C-alpha cells in the first residue's frame, strides 16, 4: 500500500551525516606571515591577523588581497605590524590587538584609531603589548596584555584595567594574559601564561582561578592556557601547553585530562612532541556539522567527532619517539606542523592559518551507506531495549538480534499463530511485552515477544465491509490503538479488544475529512489524523473535530522534543502555531529553501530535524533557522525513500 518498489535503507549518525573526507588546498594568500586570527565580516570579506610579516592585517575578497601595515609617516595606519588577534563588533568594526596598543578599523571609511597606554592615566589601556582581543555580547572590548587585562567602553573611549596582585587571591592570576573568552552565560574567562584559567565575577571584578595541582588528576593539566572554547553541546574545552587538551565541568570544577598514549594514537589528545620547544594549542573551534577542530603548534590539526569519538589527525606530527610526516605533494594532506587559527565562512569553507600561509578545506560530498535487503520495500522499524531490531517489509517481518542473528516471519495459512499478512506497514510496542503489527491486508496482529506467536484483530464495523489494509498504528496513553486504513480510522482497545470506527460524512463537518487515512499521531487529549483530503484534529473527550490544510495529502505528523507539531504533506512542510491555531509554511530564512513533498519527519539526539522527501533528505538545525539539503551527490536514490519508515536508535543512529 502506497510503498515504493525501490529499497534504500539509510544509516547515519544523528549529529553528522557520515564521516567526511577533506581536501586541503594551499590558498592564494602566500608569504603574508603567520596567520594568528581569521574572521569574516558582514560583507563576506575575510580578515586575517598577521604576526611576523611585512603587514599586520590582510583583507581578502576571494580574488585579491589588501594589506594594512604600519607607516610611521601616516597616523591612519596600524600602530604596529605585530598582530596577534582580531575581533569584530556588531557594527562591523574590526578591533586589532597589536604589540603597540589596540587599533580600531572602520572597514567602510578605512579609518584607524589607536588606543595606547599612557603613564599615570588609569583610564587608558594597561599596557601596549596586546596579546588578545575580544568583543563581548554588550559591545565592550576586552584586551589581554603582558601586564594584565583591560576593558574598553567604545562609547566613552575609557578603559578599566585588572592586574595581578600576589597578595590578593581574587585578583587576576598572572600578569601575562594569553587568551580571553566569553561563554554562553556571558562569563569572561582568561587564560594566562603561567597562572592557569580564571573566570571573572563581573559584579565584584574578582577572579576565580583554576591551577594545576601535582597530586590532583582532576586539576587543569598546565598553568599556561592558550585556548578556551564552549561547544554547542555545552562542553567546555581548554587548550594548554604540552599535552594540552582538557575539559572542565563547570558545576564541579573538575577537569578531565586527555593525555597522549602512544599505544592509542586515535584517542583524543595531542602527541607529546619530541622537540625541546614548547608545544601548545592555538585554537579549539567547532564547525557547522558539530565536529571539533583543535590546532597544535607542532602537531598539525585534529578533527574530533564528539558523537562517534573518532579522531582524525592532519599534518606533520612529531611524537616523542618518531616522526610521522604527511605527503606534501598530495593536496588532500596538510603538510604543516603548526595550525594557528581557524574560521569557517558562510559558504561552509574552512580556513586554517599557519606559519607563512593559509589553507582552505573543502568537504567532500558524503555518500550515505545503504544496506540492501531481499525485499521490495522497508516500511517500518522497532528497536528493543537490548538493541534488537524489528524491520517491517513487503515480504514479512524481520528480526535482527543484538548478536546479529536474523529471524524471518511470514504468513502461513496452515499456522493460525503466524503473521496475518506478509506486507508489514507499521510497528508499535505497548510496553507490556507485545509488538503490534499493522499489515497490508490482514488487519492488526499482536505479537508476544516472548512466545513469538501472533494474535490477529480485524478492524471492521457491524453492517459494513471494511478494508484491513493498515497504513499506520498509533498507541495513546489510554491503551487505545489508533489504526489508519484506506476506508476510515479505526480504534482498538488493547485491554478489552473493543473496536470502533470513524468515517467521513459529507453532510457533517464534525467528522473525518476523508476515509483514506495515511498517518495518525497524538498527544494528551488530542489525536491528529492525516488523510488524502487534509489534516484533522480530534478531541478524544469532547468528540469535536477541526480541519486544517484542506486539499493536501498529509503523509507525516511529528511532535519534536519541545512539543512542537510538524506536518508534512504532498506539497510542503508545515509548523503548527498554537497561539493562532493554524499552520505556517516552513522556509529556510537565509536561503528561501523549503522541502517539497514531505514523506517523513524525525528528530536526532541533538534536536535536529531530518525531513525525508521523494528525492532529498533535509536537515533542519535545532534552532529551526537553517536547512541543509542532502541529495543524489550524497548517495540518495531518487524515489527510493518511503513515508513512515524512519527510526532513531538509542545510540543516536538514524535509519
Image (spheres, helix red, strand yellow):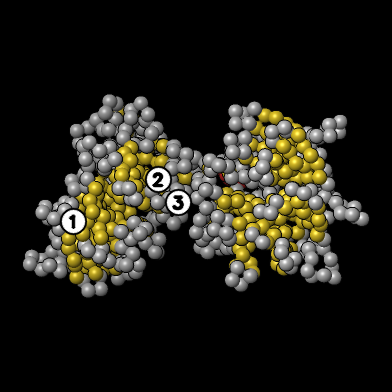
Find residue 638 and report its horizontal and vertical position in percent.
Answer: 67, 46
For this orientation, the residue located farthest to the front is 496
| 308, above or below 626, in the image | above
Residue 170 numbered mark, or none: 1
* Observer-nearest of 404 and 357: 404
Q: Is residue 69 visible?
A: no
Corner quadrant of residue 397: top right
**Residue found 79% across the figure and 39% down from its top:** 455
The reply to whether callout 2 and callout 3 are in contact (CB within 8 Å) is no
Residue under label 2 = 292
Of mark 2 and mark 1, the one earlier in the sequence is 1
For the C terminus, give its image quadrant. Answer: top right
Residue under label 3 = 288
Find residue 324 and report its horizontal and vertical position in percent.
Answer: 33, 29
Of mark 1 and mark 3, the one earlier in the sequence is 1
| 141, above or below 610, in the image | below
Residue 206 is left or right of residue 572, and the answer is: left
At mark 2, the secondary structure is: strand
Q: Is residue 489 visible?
A: yes
At mark 3, the secondary structure is: loop
Q: Nearer the viewer, mark 1 or mark 3?
A: 1
Residue 531 is left or right of residue 400, and the answer is: right
Amino acid at each position: 500500500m502506497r510503498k515504493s518498489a525501490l529499497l534504500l535503507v539509510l544509516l547515519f549518525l544523528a549529529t553528522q551525516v557520515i564521516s567526511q573526507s577533506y581536501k586541503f588546498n594551499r590558498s592564494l594568500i602566500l608569504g603574508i606571515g603567520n596567520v594568528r586570527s581569521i574572521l569574516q565580516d558582514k560583507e563576506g570579506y575575510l580578515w586575517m591577523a598577521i604576526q611576523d610579516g611585512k603587514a599586520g592585517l590582510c583583507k581578502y575578497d576571494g580574488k585579491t588581497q589588501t594589506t594594512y601595515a604600519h607607516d610611521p609617516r601616516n597616523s591612519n595606519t596600524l600602530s604596529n605590524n605585530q598582530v596577534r588577534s582580531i575581533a569584530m563588533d556588531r557594527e562591523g568594526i574590526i578591533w586589532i590587538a597589536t604589540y603597540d596598543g589596540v587599533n580600531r578599523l572602520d572597514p567602510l571609511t578605512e579609518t584607524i584609531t589607536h588606543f595606547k597606554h599612557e603613564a599615570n592615566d588609569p583610564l587608558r589601556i594597561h599596557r601596549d603589548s596586546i596579546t588578545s582581543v575580544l568583543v563581548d555580547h554588550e559591545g565592550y572590548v576586552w584586551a589581554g596584555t603582558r601586564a594584565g587585562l583591560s576593558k574598553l567602553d567604545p562609547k566613552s573611549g575609557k578603559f578599566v584595567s585588572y592586574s595581578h596582585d600576589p597578595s590578593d587571591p581574587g585578583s587576576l592570576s598572572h600578569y601575562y594574559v594569553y587568551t580571553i573568552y566569553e561563554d554562553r552565560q556571558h562569563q569572561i574567562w582568561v587564560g594566562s601564561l603561567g597562572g592557569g584559567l580564571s573566570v571573572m565575577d563581573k559584579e565584584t571584578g574578582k577572579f576565580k582561578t583554576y591551577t594545576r595541582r601535582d597530586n590532583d588528576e582532576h586539576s587543569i593539566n598546565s598553568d599556561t592556557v592558550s585556548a578556551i572554547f564552549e561547544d554547542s553541546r555545552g562542553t567546555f574545552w581548554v587548550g594548554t601547553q604540552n599535552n594540552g587538551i582538557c575539559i572542565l565541568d563547570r558545576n564541579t570544577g573538575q577537569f578531565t585530562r586527555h593525555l597522549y598514549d602512544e599505544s592509542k594514537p586515535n584517542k583524543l589528545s595531542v602527541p607529546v612532541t619530541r622537540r625541546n620547544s614548547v608545544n601548545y594549542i592555538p585554537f579549539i573551534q567547532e564547525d557547522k556539522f558539530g565536529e571539533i577542530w583543535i590546532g597544535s603548534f607542532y602537531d598539525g590539526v585534529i578533527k574530533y567527532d564528539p558523537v562517534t569519538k573518532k579522531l582524525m589527525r592532519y599534518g606533520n606530527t612529531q611524537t616523542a619517539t618518531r616522526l610521522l610526516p604527511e605527503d606534501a605533494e598530495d593536496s588532500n594532506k596538510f603538510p604543516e606542523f603548526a595550525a594557528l587559527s581557524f574560521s569557517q565562512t558562510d559558504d561552509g569553507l574552512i580556513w586554517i592559518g599557519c606559519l607563512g600561509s593559509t589553507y582552505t578545506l573543502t568537504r567532500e560530498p558524503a555518500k550515505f551507506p545503504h544496506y540492501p535487503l531481499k525485499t521490495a520495500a522497508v516500511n517500518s522499524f522497532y528497536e528493543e531495549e537490548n538493541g534488537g531490531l524489528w524491520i517491517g517489509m513487503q515480504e514479512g517481518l524481520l528480526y535482527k538480534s543484538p548478536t546479529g542473528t536474523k529471524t524471518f516471519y511470514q504468513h502461513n495459512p496452515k499456522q493460525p499463530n503466524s503473521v496475518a499478512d506478509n506486507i508489514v506497514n507499521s510497528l508499535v510496542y505497548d510496553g507490556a511485552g507485545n509488538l503490534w503489527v499493522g499489515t497490508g491486508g490482514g488487519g492488526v496482529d499482536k505479537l508476544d515477544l516472548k512466545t513469538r506467536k501472533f494474535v490477529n484483530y480485524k478492524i471492521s464495523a457491524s453492517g459494513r465491509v471494511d478494508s484491513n489494509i493498515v497504513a499506520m498504528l498509533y498507541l495513546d496513553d489510554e491503551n487505545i490503538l489508533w489504526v489508519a486504513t484506506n476506508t476510515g480510522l479505526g480504534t482498538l482497545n488493547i485491554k478489552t479488544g473493543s473496536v470502533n470506527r470513524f468515517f467521513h460524512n459529507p453532510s457533517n463537518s464534525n467528522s473525518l475529512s476523508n476515509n483514506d487515512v495515511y498517518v495518525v499521531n497524538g498527544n494528551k487529549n488530542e489525536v491528529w489524523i492525516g488523510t488524502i483530503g487534509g489534516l484533522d484534529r480530534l478531541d478524544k473527550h469532547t468528540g469535536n473535530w477541526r480541519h486544517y490544510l484542506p486539499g493536501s495529502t498529509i503523509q507525516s505528523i511529528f511532535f519534536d522534543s519541545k512539543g512542537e507539531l510538524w506536518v508534512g504533506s504532498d506539497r510542503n512542510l508545515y509548523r503548527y502555531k498554537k497561539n493562532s491555531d493554524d499552520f505556517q509554511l516552513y522556509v529556510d530564512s537565509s536561503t528561501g529553501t523549503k522541502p517539497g513533498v514531505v514523506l517523513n519527519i524525525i528528530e536526532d539526539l541533538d534536536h535536529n530535524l531530518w525531513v525525508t522527501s521523494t528525492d532529498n533528505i533535509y536537515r533542519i538545525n535545532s534552532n529551526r533557522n537553517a536547512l541543509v539539503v542532502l541529495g543524489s551527490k550524497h548517495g540518495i536514490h531518487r524515489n527510493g525513500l518511503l513515508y513512515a519508515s524512519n527510526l532513531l536508535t538509542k545510540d543516536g543512529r538514524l535509519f
